[in-house]
Image (cartoon, rainbow, N blue to C red):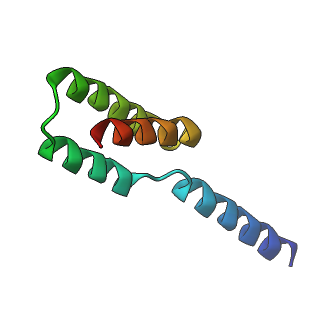
Amino acid sequence: MTKKIFLTIASFFLTASVYAGCMKSEIKQLDTKLKNSDISVEKKAEISKLRDLVVSNEHSNSELAFESYEKAMSLLN
């Protein structure tokens, strides 16, 4: 009985850890908007850096990743 409870708790923890902070759709949205936008080269470079921050931090620091995503979206609009 103890093993079943432990395995259940461990599986919930692992499942939550694997999916936490996943921002695939946000990254695709940034890519699409960046590709279809008519903005300056400097802004595109800044948005690309922010996109890279989103990708590198989506699992380790989701708060920074989301802030970078929001800033990039605000520059695109």
Q: Is residue 16 above or below residue 69?
A: below
Q: Quadrant of residue 15?
A: bottom right
Give the quarter of the figure containing the C terminus.
top left
Q: Residue furthest right?
A: 2
Q: Nearer the viewer, residue 14 or 69?
A: 69
Q: What residue lies at 13% left-to-right and 46% top-to-bottom?
A: 36
Q: What residue lies at 56% left-to-right and 54% top-to-bottom?
A: 20
Left or right: residue 25 compared with residue 39: right
Q: Position of residue 62 (x, y in %)?
A: 55, 42
Q: Residue furthest front?
A: 77
Q: Is residue 65 above or below residue 28?
A: above
Q: Is residue 7 above or below residue 60?
A: below
Q: Position of residue 65 (x, y in %)?
A: 48, 39
Q: Residue furthest bottom?
A: 1
Q: Quadrant of residue 3?
A: bottom right
Give the quarter of the figure containing the N terminus.
bottom right
